[in-house]
Image: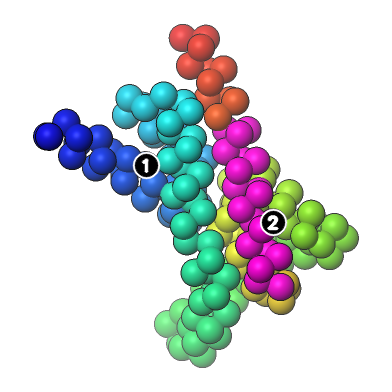
Amino acid sequence: MLDILETIKDEIAVMFVAAMPLVELRGAIPLGISMGFTPLESTALSIIGNIIPVPFLLRLLEPIMDYLEKTTLFSKLVKKVKKRTLKKSRDKIKKYSLLGLFILVAVPIPTTGAWTGCIAATLLKLDPRKALVSIVSGIIAAGIIVFSLSYKVISVF
């Protein structure tokens, strides 16, 4: 019984890291592998964890950012995040629409991912349902890429 609880705790930890901004599944997959999960288990947990916040972000980011932008404490930070996200994503998403959003989320490099995709979709006023499909597809693609890289690294050792 104690082993099951320990495994569940570790699974939740991997999913929680995958749900965090910046780290997302790019950090959660290697973390899960280092915790003893197989690359496939770690990838599945990370994809699920990375997907969980997306519907909430797409629904809540706009009112939260609007509110925070009106406060003196967070106004500069929100404006900086908006500017950085639009600079990184506007041309790609305008040119390729939802495919551009998919690419933004799927490419596993720092400062891209589901959170940036949700912010971009919100700022560019994309249809939330279509954006959800594009972002989830991007998460799955990023998971496959990071899985492949992690699997190759582990098989070398």
Q: Amino acid at mark 1?
A: Val
Determine which quarter of the picture holds residue 34: top left
Name the image quarter holding the N terminus: top left
On screen, residue 145 versus residue 95, left or right, reads: left
Left or right, residue 62 beside residue 42: right
Q: Is residue 101 visible?
A: yes
| Most frequent secondary structure within the magenta stretch | helix
Of residues 66 and 141, the one nearer the viewer is: 141
| In the image, residue 8 above or below residue 117 | above
Disc nearer the start of the sequence (1/2): 1
Work out whether 45 lies above or below 153: below
Report x, y in % for residue 82: 63, 71
Most extreme residue toward the left is 2
Q: Is residue 30 visible?
A: no
**What residue does disc 2 label?**
134
Farthest top residue in view: 157
* Kind of residue at disc 2: Ser
Which residue: 55% across, 29% down? 147
Q: Nearer the viewer, residue 138 or 4?
A: 4
Q: Which mark is residue 14?
A: 1
Q: Secondary structure at mark 1?
A: helix
Q: Secondary structure at mark 2?
A: helix
Q: Based on the displayed image, in which of its 4 quarters is residue 85 positioned?
A: bottom right
Residue 93 quadrant:
bottom right
Q: Residues within 10 Å of mark 1 (few under 14, many from 20)?
A: many
Q: Position of residue 106 (x, y in %)?
A: 66, 45
Q: Residues within 10 Å of mark 2 (few under 14, many from 20)?
A: many
**What residue range appears in magenta?**
127-146
Q: Residue at x 52, y 9 (%)?
A: 156
Q: Cα distance, mark 1 to mark 2?
A: 23 Å
Residue at the spot 67% in from the left edge and 74% down from the top edge: 123
